[in-house]
Image (tube, rainbow, N blue to C red):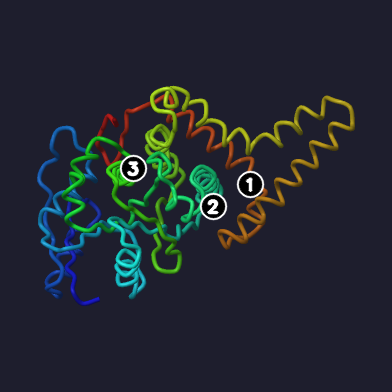
Amino acid sequence: YPGFEVIVVDDRSSDGTGAIAREIAQLDSRVRVIDARPLAEGWFGKQWACAEGAAASISALVCFKDADTVHAPDQMPRAVNALLDGNADMLSVAARQEMYTFWERTIQPLVFFMLFARYGGTEVVNRARNPTNKIANGQFILFRRDVYDGIGGHASVRDTVAEDLALAQRICSLGRSGILILGLDQLSTRMYTTLGEVVSGWMKNIYAGGRMAMPGGAAGRSLFPVTLLLPALLILAPVLVLGFAALLPSGALVWAAAAVAFSLLWWALVFRVALGMSPAYALTFPLGAAMLLYIVLRAIVRGSRVRWKDREYLSS
């Protein structure tokens, strides 16, 4: 795909990203590195950096990518063709999430399952007409530039931690077309590497994302802390019932054990078929659900307060 430029926004990176990007820019004229201006009041850092990059671009299409994403050589033309063929104004790609450590593989699949249970597959998302049923992946979002500017760009979602979800909902609410496609063999990333990163990363996203995904307006959002707890509790339910059934007659224990066995089989299929992981990780589903419950509870306690990359925010 020859007609492109890469604008790397260095927003106080401390891991050498800026220096590496500048070395590449010296070797390739298609790459530019810009330093983000000091964060403006009321903005989240990612939205500010994206807006800075967009302001430096004059392209007819503008694509926002996280710096830690890995792309197949033909990923960009595929994405552009999908945008044009679908007559869409915005396109987002669901990436393959790389997971290597025990805690990544124990917790993250349950989070992804929770998201799938809420939104369904890409076809369900793309058919949805209610903005609360729209979702995007902030790791890769491609816009027609005139539409991006027309909806207010990242400035329109500057004060929410779940900016990708907010953009998808805004596109829909304004009568524009946004689509989500699977790109598991085209795009990949590793979101977190340690237990601390998994907990803090999902904690910052779950509260805002859960509230924005609630149907029913203000009434629905008032109930969302309860509904946010339900997925983890439902996953844990067979194990909890088994524990209580040990105190009851043997018939109840048999049924509870059968429920746990069914859960193990279900999660073995999810881990093996959907994620390509060892089905042995199904044995960790009670631990993963307990950690997910812990993350959700901490997110509810923190509420709209978010800490990320040494910055404190208050999400809308």
The residue pinned by badge 1 equals 284
- Pick the residue in front: 129 or 231: 129
x and y percent of residue 95 in the render?
41, 59
Q: Which mark is residue 169?
A: 3
Q: Nearer the viewer, mark 2 or mark 3?
A: 3
- Which class describes the residues within 10 Å of circle 3: few (<14), some (14-19), or many (20+)? many
Cα separation between marks 2 and 3? 30 Å
**Which residue is located at x 11 percent, y 73 percent?**
29
Asked if the residue at tag 1 contacts the one at tag 3, i.e. Cβ–Cβ closer than 8 Å, the answer is no
- What residue appears at the point 39 percent right and 24 percent down from the top-left corner? 218
Instruction: Return the disc, 2 or 3, that comes first in the chain's sequence.
Output: 2
Q: Is residue 12 among what the camera can see?
A: no
Which residue position is annotated with label 2?
Answer: 105
Q: Amino acid at mark 2?
A: Arg
Q: Quadrant of the N terminus?
A: bottom left
**Lower position in the chain sequence, tag 3 or tag 1:** 3
